[in-house]
Image (cartoon, rainbow, N blue to C red):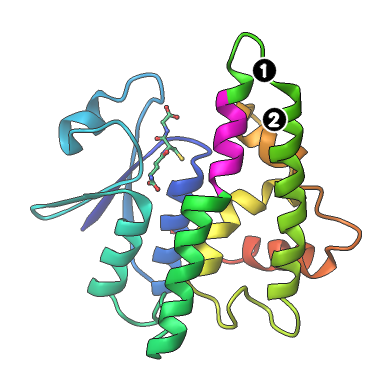
């Protein structure tokens, strides 16, 4: 049995839930109190979720968890099998995690300062808004970000969905409020809006 530690409203946990359901892999979820990470620390030596535990193996950091799932349960694949298309998916995931995600992360850090720099916040926000066009263009003529449903959709959806679906009841995390505010997915982003609805309708483990 595969166990995964989670907290409510976690974007990185939802990546794993989408990927596991896509593969038909069952997960035994371990619910952790966000205010007390001791079970997560005990099992993995760090505080962040998701953490996957299977037999003797402990895996954390969502891209590594996704890679573990894809290796152990290759069908259907998350990463394309074709070498060039697989490389494209890796480029997308690296860009999303290292570049795209940096903007809302930096905004959150700025907003937590005593005197946030408004000009910097606006510049970061404008970049997030501008990147909506990029997602819209990736969906031109196809239903998923890189063609077939896969790792790009799993990695991006939990973050982009806020711009379309808003905050779920009970979720008032600053990071998620940033994602709502700076991703006005509506007019001009019809394909992106439809993609959010499409992926949202898929099952979660
Ligand atoms: N790079 C890690 C980041 C994990 C992460 O930031 N997890 C969040 C939940 S989405 C967390 O546990 N945050 C700690 C907190 O909110 O205190 C991954 O992709 O799994």
In this figure, which residue is indicated by the disc labeled 1? 116
Q: Is residue 152 left or right of residue 5?
A: right
* Residue 105 is a magenta residue: yes
At mark 1, the secondary structure is: loop
CB-based contact (under 8 Å), mark 2 and mark 1: yes
Q: Nearer the viewer, residue 118 or 198?
A: 118
Above-or-below relation of 73 to 179: below
State the residue at coordinates (64%, 60%).
200
Q: Measured from the top left, where is residue 147 in percent x and y?
A: 60, 83
Q: Nearer the viewer, residue 162 or 53?
A: 162
Secondary structure mostly seen in magenta is helix
- Which contiguous range is marked in magenta? 101-109
Q: Is residue 21 left or right of residue 75?
A: right
State the residue at coordinates (71%, 30%).
121
State the residue at coordinates (68%, 79%).
143
In this figure, which residue is indicated by the disc labeled 2? 120
- Mark 1 packing: few (<14 Cα in 10 Å), some, or many (20+)? some
Above-or-below relation of 164 to 38: below
Q: Quadrant of ligand 1?
A: top left
Q: Measured from the top left, where is residue 179 in percent x and y?
A: 67, 41
The answer to whether one can see residue 200 in this image is yes
In this view, the residue farthest toward the bottom is 82
Image quarter in which the N terminus is found: bottom left
The answer to whether one can see residue 168 in this image is no
The mark found on residue 138 in the picture is: none
């Amino acid at each position: 049995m595969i166990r995964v530690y989670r907290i409510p409203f976690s974007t990185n946990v939802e990546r794993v839930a989408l990927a596991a359901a896509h593969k038909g892999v069952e997960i035994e979820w371990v619910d952790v109190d966000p205010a007390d990470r001791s079970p997560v620390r005990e099992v993995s030596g760090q505080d962040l979720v998701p953490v996957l535990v299977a037999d003797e193996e402990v895996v954390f950091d969502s891209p590594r968890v996704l890679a573990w799932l894809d290796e152990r349960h290759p069908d259907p694949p998350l990463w394309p099998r074709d070498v060039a298309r697989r490389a494209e998916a890796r480029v997308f995931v690296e860009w999303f995690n290292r570049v795209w995600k940096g903007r809302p992360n930096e905004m959150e850090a700025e907003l937590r300062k005593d005197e946030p720099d408004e000009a910097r916040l606006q510049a970061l926000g404008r970049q997030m808004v501008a990147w909506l066009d990029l997602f819209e263009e990736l969906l031109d003529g196809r239903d998923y970000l890189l063609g077939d449903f896969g790792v790009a959709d799993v990695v991006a959806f939990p973050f982009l969905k806020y711009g379309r679906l808003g905050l779920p009841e009970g979720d008032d995390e600053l990071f998620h409020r940033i994602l709502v505010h700076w991703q006005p997915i509506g007019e001009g982003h019809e394909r992106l809006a439809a993609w959010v609805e499409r992926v949202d309708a898929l099952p979660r483990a």
